Image (cartoon, rainbow, N blue to C red):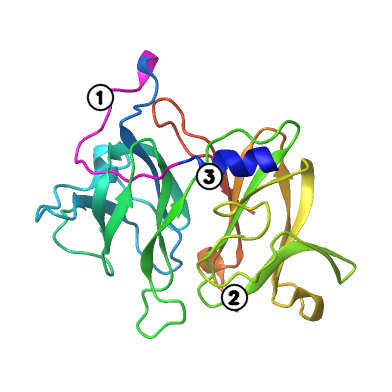
Amino acid sequence: MKRFAAAMAAVLTVVWLGCGDDTSDGGGNNGPPQDKAWVRFGNLSPDAPPLDICVKQSSSQSWGSPVLAANQISGGLTFPAMSKVIFIDAGTLDFRAVAPGGTCDTPVGIDLTAQTLNAHGTYTLTAVGLLAPGATGPYRLQQYIEHAEAPAAGKARFRFVTTIPNAPPIADGIADGGTWVRSFTEAELPFPFGASGVGIVDGYQDIDPDPALPLTIRPSPPQTNLDLYTAPINFRAGIITAVWAVGLVGGTNAQQLGYFVCDEGPAADGGATTCARH
């Protein structure tokens, strides 16, 4: 775990600017570009429409054109969804969500501004919260740091983030017969934060592999509250697995409570992000 923490501390973060499909300095046999930020875009807002993203340098007045459409994601991202890794120019950046198929002139919700992202940094930039006026957990674009280092030998790496806007602060762990037996985080998790505690860096921790770990979330404190949700998660040795708690407490259909589970790890050409609801 010390090796993991030290490696994590050494990682820098980044963000992208650009309008076209960025394949210069990377992809193919050249490997991923080391002078770009590596960004995975998402839509984890339960009531948001499909979204594309626009990006500009904070010092610029021009938003350019939508990023996802320029990277073969023409229909935008429909909740819950996560894009492939997209390589973008580093810098101090502003982000704007827009409807797919249009321009950057009409934002969906408020912009996220003055985000400093570094070359060869790895990030998730996703919509979270509710667009409905006056809703608990209001809509926003949120930046999260990613870590792509390999887990410790024989371990799985686990990233947990809650994006449930109408949930109280929660705990994630394991319950057995109604009794809470283990917590994976030391502190309660309010929307829209990730796990924290000793040995946890930016929401990531190394755990023992388990093909069907019964991951449970409860309102905090978990010892005196009932389950909000539980589902088996396959944590594999050598694999980084992100578990996003998504949906709404009391939600139905697409907004029902659950986990959005993604394998992380940038591919040389951006690749795809493999995710599934649980």
Q: Tag 2 or tag 1, which sits nearer the N-term?
A: 1
Marks 2 and 3, the one that precedes in the sequence: 3
Type of amino acid under label 3: Ala
Report the residue marked by disc 3: 9
Quadrant in the rendering for residue 272: top left
Q: Position of residue 108 (x, y in %)?
A: 26, 66
Determine whether label 2 and label 3 are within 8 Å by CB: no
In the picture of the structure, the residue carrying the numbered disc 1 is 24
**In the displayed structure, does residue 64 sit left or right of residue 120?**
left
Measured from the top left, where is residue 105 in percent x and y? Answer: 13, 60
Quarter of the image with the C terminus in it: bottom right
Q: Which residue is mark 2?
A: 249
SS state under label 2: loop
Q: Looking at the image, is mark 2 or mark 3 nearer the viewer?
A: 3
Expressed as whole percent of the image width and height from the top left, the position of residue 51 reads 32, 56
Instruction: Examine the residues drawn in magenta and state their main secondary structure.
Output: loop
